[in-house]
Image: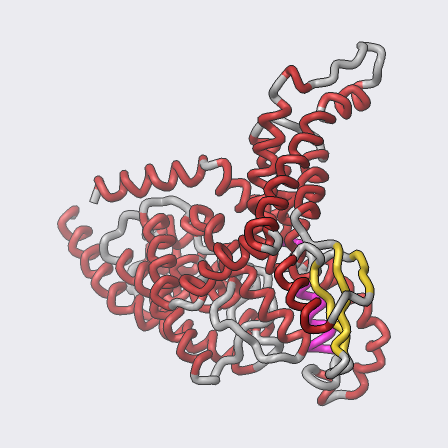
Amino acid sequence: MDGFADALGRAGAWAGQNKYLGAIKNAFQNYMPATIAGAVGVLWCNVLVNNQTGLGKFWSGIMVLEVLNPIFSAMQFATIGCISIGICMLVGQEIAEANGEKGAYPAVLSFILLLMVTPTNFSIFYDTKKKAASYIAANRTGAIDAATKSFGKAVGSFSAIESSYIAATGLFTALLVGIIGLEIYNMFRKNDHLKIKMPEQVPPGVAKAFEVLIPTVLTCIVVGLVELVVQLLTGSELNALIFNSVQKPLQNIIGNNIVAVCVLYIIISLFWCVGIHGNNMVSGVKEPIFRPLLYANVAAFKAGKKIPYVFNLTMLQMFGEFGGSGVTIGLVIAILIFSKREDNRTIAGISLVPGLFNINETVTFGIPLVLNPILDIPFLLAPCVCLIVGYILINIGFCPKIVVEVPWTCPPVIFGFIATGGNIFGAISQLIVIAVSFLVYTPFLFIYERQQNKESAAAE
């Protein structure tokens, strides 16, 4: 047991100190207020002031507020719809700070590099048979050639930013550009031969701008060359290559796989069992995979289309993290109902209110669950069992698919209601898994307290 705990401790220390995992985790945490603002926009336009899918269907009076819908729609687009831009800038800033650079310029450079690998020029083709126009990114040479053969020459062109790539579809590209691009920039920045030295009389701000001028130009050239090579080899852009070869396969392998999800949560719980914050350890891997799935559901919900994914970031929180890691709200309830030990009841009483806001450090370290061979078993099992139950409830159509991002501190049941777009069966589904966690923890609580009583009797 000690050897296993030491191995997990070393893995946790490595993950906690890893510059790139830390940068990804911090970037998503810092962007969280924006994503919650976007969720408010989705709720307003689709759950409240909407006469097709929302409250307006049952109460026409609320539709007087429809004049405000463009504000909330714009809020959703500027936050969730542009998440790749924000994450790229934040992760680039984190990498720059880890490399010893201060100031906001690295975030600006990250944005520039992301735009360099994002389609911005498009050709317009007209299908005379269907009497419909379509557009194709000008750098997709294979698609352009095929369209030219089918429809003739392009009838026009325009410049814009490919919206799908600044949303969740481009998230992996944003992370890679922010990390690798800023590492390349740092390599050039630290080379004294590439710095333009200005006289001492020049203001510091101006001197700094000239100092990073050549590193900026060289970094842009390197990233541009990578984009060009990818275009020449694949006939498409870097964004499409990364999405099709990295992001989409990972989402298919892990994002729609209940076994992989359960393994992920066992790893999270194992870290907690030795006193390491498991969610922090794996968030750098979990968020880039499951957050795009959430936003794909949000986009489909907003457009009134079929919701594509069962698993996403909010679904995992709803069924695998309610009451905190290990879904320990079930243990707290079990103690309050069955425990005859005053020490355990005191800890459970203190832990109940924080647990309702998904904060469970008081029970995790108070009982304690850390290095507790009896209660660690349900601590590992409960999240997996609850996720499996949630997966089944969604697949049989009892619980709607999750379509709204909810603050992680939102109390259970209310969380389920909001996450499913204001559906009462989302709330009922979360009540069901709370009961499941209670059933998983209860027999182990009896065993644990029996052991506690034996130890107390022996000590007397």
- Viewer-side residue, 242 vs 87: 242
Residue plotted at (47% across, 68% down): 311
The range drawn in magenta is 32-49
Regarding residue 196, the answer to whether it shows in the image is: yes
Looking at the image, the residue that sits furthest to the left is 458
Residue plotted at (72% across, 88% down): 57
Report whether 390 appears left or right of 84.
Answer: left
- Quarter of the image for the N terminus: give it: top left
- Above or below residue 183? Residue 202 is above
Report whether 358 appears left or right of 387.
Answer: right
- Above or below residue 416? Residue 205 is above
Task: Verify whether residue 277 appears in magenta.
Answer: no
Residue plotted at (16% across, 46% down): 459
Which secondary structure type mostly characterizes the magenta part of the structure?
A: helix
Pinpoint residue 284: horizontal percent, then vertical percent.
Answer: 49, 48
Task: Verify whether residue 39 appears in magenta.
Answer: yes
- Viewer-side residue, 284 vs 223: 223
